[in-house]
């Protein structure tokens, strides 16, 4: 008895090629449908994630203090291993500590300047990205800010303690993109008063010394009239105009603490450290100084207040 040991071909090269072409077509069509509905896939968090986040949300405080404006920028190291705010991790100014009082309203202006995607929020948790305070979020991990995008959010600390502003994209906090908000108990200050109807106009131009080592307002550093003391009554309306008379870039704000450029009050900014006035450029700001106390007008470009560009603003 003999056997035919001729190999039996289960398929042919032509048939294999046809099957591969069909499979490739299915992959291409499926990919087209998936990415065509990308906005749908990222439009909302999975139900379980939304439920967990809702359970972890914290209650914000009541606005009874000062209005603080904080400018933050997402930045990344060249090798994309370190993430931080405002400056590369390890550099001066990275992840600046924010000092506030319970009841202050913190307004965050956040810009993404990195290649990675980022989102923002404030939490009291010492780790992770849960427990975000409602209203403090900008974007989400599933719908983050992309390069060049920006957003604004608010946070009112409910009580004294340490809080954290961070990137809420998983892993980015661990890579360094987190800063502290140190909140003290609300000061026993006089409550904000109603407008008096009195209006003051002040001009506070930016000036520099010839060697650019010292800066001042209203006059060349060391000259008569430099950094004049300003006094107004609580409830007075204040108009401030400023022109950059120097070579360097400058910006303006009234702060509670000149060593903490984030402690801006009354939304009193002209330009910002990220968008300063150039030589010859002018700006104006208007606000009601509604709370008595001693404040300071400063240049908010890092280092300029230390170099002399600051004066006293007293509300009686």
Image: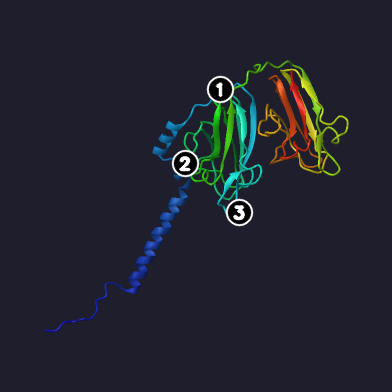
- Which residue is pictured at 71% across the width and 18% down the height? 235
Corner quadrant of residue 95: top right
Circles 3 and 1: CB distance less than 8 Å? no
- Residue at the disc numbered 1: 62
Labels 3 and 1: the sequence-earlier one: 1
54 shown above or below 89: above
Residue 38 in view: yes
Residue 138 in view: no
- Residue at the disc numbered 2: 43
How far apart are the alpha carbons under marks 1 and 2? 31 Å
Of the 4 image quadrants, the one containing the C terminus is top right
Secondary structure beneath dot 3 equals loop
From this viewpoint, which residue is outermost toward the right? Answer: 224
Dot 3: within a 10 Å radius of its alpha carbon, few (fewer than 14), some, or many (20 or more) residues?
few
- Which residue is pictured at 75% across the width and 25% down the height? 313
- Which residue is pictured at 59% across the width and 44% down the height? 84
How far apart are the alpha carbons under marks 2 and 3? 31 Å
Which is in the foreground here, disc 2 or disc 3? Answer: 3
* Location of residue 280 in the rendering, given as x and y in whole percent from the top left corner: 82, 40
How far apart are the alpha carbons under marks 3 and 1? 41 Å
Label for residue 78? 3
- Which residue is pictured at 58% across the width and 36% down the height? 180
* Location of residue 15 in the rendering, given as x and y in whole percent from the top left corner: 33, 70
Secondary structure beneath dot 1 equals loop
Which is in the foreground here, disc 3 or disc 1? Answer: 3
* Location of residue 102 in the rendering, given as x and y in whole percent from the top left corner: 58, 25
* Side of 52 where 270 appears, left or right: right
Secondary structure beneath dot 2 equals loop
Which is in the foreground here, disc 1 or disc 2? Answer: 1
């Amino acid at each position: 008895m003999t056997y035919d040991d001729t190999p039996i071909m289960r398929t042919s090269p032509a048939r294999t090629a046809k099957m591969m072409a069909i499979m490739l077509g299915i992959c291409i069509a499926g990919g087209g449908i998936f990415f065509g509905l990308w906005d749908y896939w990222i439009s909302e968090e999975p139900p379980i994630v939304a439920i967990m986040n809702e359970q972890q949300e914290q209650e914000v405080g009541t606005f009874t203090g000062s209005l603080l404006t904080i400018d933050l920028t997402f930045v990344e190291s060249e090798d994309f291993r370190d993430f931080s705010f405002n400056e590369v991790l390890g550099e001066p100014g990275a992840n600046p500590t924010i000092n506030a009082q319970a009841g202050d309203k913190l307004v965050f202006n956040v810009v993404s300047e990195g290649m990675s995607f980022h989102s923002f929020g404030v939490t009291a948790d010492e780790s992770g990205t849960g427990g975000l305070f409602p209203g403090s979020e900008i974007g989400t991990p599933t719908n983050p800010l992309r390069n060049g995008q920006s957003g604004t959010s608010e946070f009112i600390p409910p009580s004294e303690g340490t809080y954290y502003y961070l990137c809420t994209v998983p892993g980015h906090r661990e890579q360094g993109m987190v800063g502290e908000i140190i909140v003290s108990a609300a000061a026993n200050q006089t409550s904000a008063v109603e407008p008096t109807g009195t209006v003051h106009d002040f001009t506070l131009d930016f000036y520099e010394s010839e060697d650019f080592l010292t800066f001042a307002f209203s006059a060349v550093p060391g000259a008569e009239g430099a950094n004049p003391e300003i006094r107004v009554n609580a409830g007075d309306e204040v108009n401030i105009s400023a022109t950059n008379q120097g070579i360097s870039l400058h910006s303006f704000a009234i702060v509670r603490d000149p060593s903490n450029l984030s402690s801006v009050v009354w939304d009193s900014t002209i330009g910002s450290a990220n968008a300063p006035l150039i030589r010859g450029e002018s700006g104006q700001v208007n606000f009601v100084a509604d709370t008595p106390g001693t404040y300071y007008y400063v240049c908010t470009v890092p280092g300029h207040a230390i170099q002399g560009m600051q004066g006293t603003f007293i509300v009686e």
